[in-house]
Amino acid sequence: KIKGIIISMPPTAWTSSNLLSYTVRPTTPPTYYGRIIATSHPQGAKVYLDNAYKGKTPLNLDRVTAGQHRIKLVMAGYQDWSSYISVSPSRTTTVSADLVPLPAYGSISVYCNQGNAKIYLDGIYKKRTSVNKSVEIKNVRKGYHELLVTKDGYQDWISTIMIVGNQTRMVSAFLVPEINYDGSIAVYCNVSGAKIFVNGTYKTTTSSSQPKILEEFRERTYEITLIKDGYRTWVEDIWVYAGEIISLYVEMIEIEY
């Protein structure tokens, strides 16, 4: 087996006394990394690069491998933001995100002293009250809302309330009976068929056997006039009180010829 080859030295004429010189220059290896600067409004969002947590905004990410990456920003109370970005060698890629708030919802707990009252929120019927027991209205968007509790025979309860996300607003609605603001007039007369006028407007005719009831008069002064052929006209001003019946006793006097 051949281990090597021995050859003779070249002739002296082929040699030179000049030494060969050379310089060793290091070769810079190619750069495969770039940088990402991530910011958000508001600040403090968590940054995930290719599903790996890196920190919170504002954030500088060095030595990011060149190529395509997926970046995601996450913050409580806001919609997640994500995008695919391209990182170039020795270059900086800037990512800026305006985070969108999530729709926030709260609830309303309504306590009422009357049962079976209707509850309206912003004019939309929701449910009925339970006597001396709270009922809850869920998934109410945060902000100001108009709440109405109503029941026949009672004055409406209405209020503007503020709803905060992820919180329950406690509301107490105390219903009070309606006040009857109208009064009535009972006209007793000794003759039948006399025409009754109120402030000049005809209403009905009298009956000698029973009173005629005139209803729905606001509290104030009214002029009552009774007219019948062959009898003197009867006129009187009366004051009608709210919620009361005013009795008039009219004696028509026959005209003597």
Image (tube, rainbow, N blue to C red):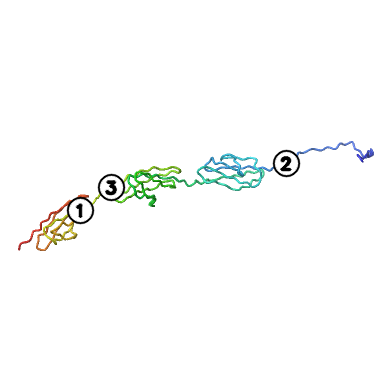
Distance between the alpha carbons at the discs numbered 3 and 2: 90 Å
Count how many numbered circles sit on residues in the image. Answer: 3
| Mark 3, other Cα within 10 Å: few <14 / some 14–19 / many ≥20 | few
Q: Are marks 3 and 2 in contact (CB under 8 Å)?
A: no
Q: Secondary structure at mark 3?
A: loop
| Above or below for 192 versus 107 | below
Q: Are marks 3 and 1 in contact (CB under 8 Å)?
A: no
Which of the marked residues, 3 or 2, is nearer the chain's N terminus?
Answer: 2
3 vs 2, front mark: 3
- Image coordinates for residue 242, horizontal then vertical, percent: 22, 50
Residue linked to disc 1: 184
- Image coordinates for residue 13, horizontal then vertical, percent: 94, 39
38 lies left or right of 126: right
At a point 82% along the width and 38% down the height, the residue shown is 22
3 vs 1, front mark: 3
Residue linked to disc 2: 29
1 vs 2, front mark: 1
Which of the marked residues, 3 or 1, is nearer the chain's N terminus?
Answer: 3
Residue linked to disc 3: 177
- Image coordinates for residue 127, horizontal then vertical, percent: 38, 50
55 lies left or right of 216: right
In what quadrant of the picture does the N terminus appear?
top right
| Mark 2, other Cα within 10 Å: few <14 / some 14–19 / many ≥20 | few
Kind of residue at badge 1: Ser
